[in-house]
Image (cartoon, rainbow, N blue to C red):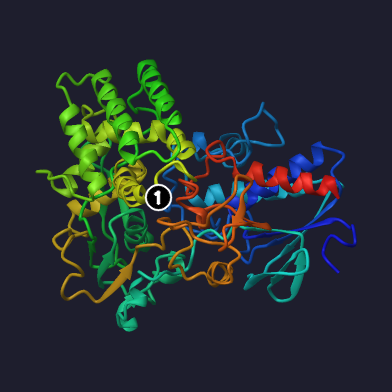
Amino acid sequence: MSARASRGPLRVAIVGLGPKGLYALERLAAIASAEGSVAPLAVDIYEPHPTPGAGPVYDPGQPAYLRMNFAAGMIDMWPPRESDPARPSFSEWRAANAPDNTEAYPPRALVGQYLADGFERVLDGCGSTIHSKLRPEAVTSIRPTDGGWEVAATERREYDEVLVATGHAATWDGALSEAGTALRDLVPAVFPVERCLSSDRVAAGSVVAIRGFALTMIDATLALTEGRGGRFRPGREPHLLSYESAGDEVAKVYPYSRTGRPMLAKPDPESAIGSAELDRIAAEGRSPLEALPEGSPIGAAADVVAHVACESLCSAGDTVDPSREVAQRLDDALAGRATPTAATPAEEIERSIAVGAGAAAPGVDWAIGHTWRAVYPALVTRLGAGGLREDEWPAFRRLATEMERLAFGPPPVNAAKLLALIECGKVDLSHLDDGPAPGADLVVDAVIPPPGAAGLGQPLLKQIVRDGHARIAAGRRGLELTADVTCVGADGTPSHGLAAIGRPTEDWVIGNDTLNRALHPQPELWARRVAERARAG
């Protein structure tokens, strides 16, 4: 008998309840509760992590030095709405629950507490329409039945609707552990730092090579220094820090990466360059991006970004025409070339901190990074799905990689910590683009699995693609979706009742690694479709 033949409650499974799964659950609960004609739904939530809503990325138990690079004032797990005490933004929740923390870029653990609290609020608000059950189990397969889907975990259960929201993968084809590196010399992952980088695993006094020079490398380095008792003090400038060593830390850290270029610091929200004119320029820049036709070349979007960056830099006070330099930077990024610079990586980091603190004049790096952040919502809306030509995706990913370095780097405090560790010699950049430093005691792999569904160590994603229930769009990394978030099967037809959201869909949906509720409509689209199906019976 099919799942709907009995005409009982619509049975729904949400596989993975990090933030994206939580947002989908919240929308389903809100829509079903607000529309009284919706029939009851039975929702099973599969999440093996002990803190549903937060998941491992925002685990409330992680150290406080692991910070957000997303400003506190922008974190809100609820959709845009009028003020509601039962649905607080992070800032409102923090004022009531952690008033001593006022940092612009808060600890991820504190945000995890907020998300976990939000999960409980969602459950409390379900009313009689949704009957939910949390199942702390990992799902191993999803297969079709006569009219439904079988989800296999500790048991096999049948559902009418399944949403895959599995988030970050544990490993991937490009991991060092997959390349035959001797495991006795390899720490294959950074998180959770309390286990992966403990003093038992990485002994005090060790010389450590770290693969990667991005956000995860900074987290790993802080775990091996500040996490071992080292302390940061005020530095030579108000926006800089100095470092005092401790006895249990590692001796030296040698990061290395493919490009050797650092991520630049996010601006301090309180001192960031801003004006009504900059807001106007950004708004006018978003309009032509939103108007790009289907199947546009990425160069058309890059031209708009270049124009907005030049206008922004001139508005911020630069009197030299930056158009040639901006165009060259974007051309290099599209081609995957590193733009030559006379600045050392440490100098690049220091200047980005100073610009973000209002202590130095902005330049081209600031203009391009600011512009990418300002127009990003339009890029997400217009370039996903069929917005770009199929053959343009490699160039887009090259561009996005460089823009991530300029626009979505570490919070200023963590950038200042990294610079202090470089200046005191604890972090050594002498082998930055040469591979692991000779003589290192071990190597830490701080390159996390990429988003999408291709080449990842997620058996569930591999299974649904292998069995033809979902497919990876040509030239992309993520699962192809219909407009209502249904997975597209290998034959090009929708796999009705099977949907996906978040990181597994990257490139089909752009920019999933964010807590910004306003950026993606997928939770709402999925929830409305499921509610309509429940109403139809």
Residue at (57%, 42%) from the top-left corner?
A: 98
Task: For residue 304, say whether it is visible.
Answer: yes
Residue 389 occupies quadrant: top left
Q: Residue at x 18, y 54 (%)?
A: 424
Q: How many residues crowd around disc 1 within 10 Å: few (fewer than 14), some, or many (20 or more)?
A: some
Q: Secondary structure at mark 1?
A: helix
Residue 387: percent from the left, percent from the top?
45, 41
Residue 117 shows in the view? no
Looking at the rendered image, the quarter that the N terminus falls into is bottom right
Query: Quadrant of the rendered structure where residue 308 is?
Result: top left
**Residue 449 vs residue 84: left or right?**
left
| Residue in view at x 36 percent, y 43 percent | 408
Q: Nearer the viewer, residue 312 or 263?
A: 312
Which amino acid, mark 1?
Answer: Glu
Image location of residue 421, percent across then percent down: 24, 54
Identify which residue, 193 or 79, lies in the foreground. Answer: 79
Quick one: which residue is furthest to the left in this view? Answer: 342
Q: Does residue 288 lie above or below 295 as drawn?
A: above
Q: Is residue 140 above or below residue 355?
A: below
x%, y% of residue 91?
A: 56, 35
Kindly identify the residue that appears in the image at 81 percent across and 49 percent down. 534
In terms of image quadrants, where is residue 246? bottom left
Q: Which residue is mark 1?
A: 390
> Of residues 303 and 68, which is closer to you in this image?
303
Q: How many numbered marks, from 0 up?
A: 1
Q: Taking 497 as reference, is 238 left or right? A: left
Q: Residue furthest top?
A: 277
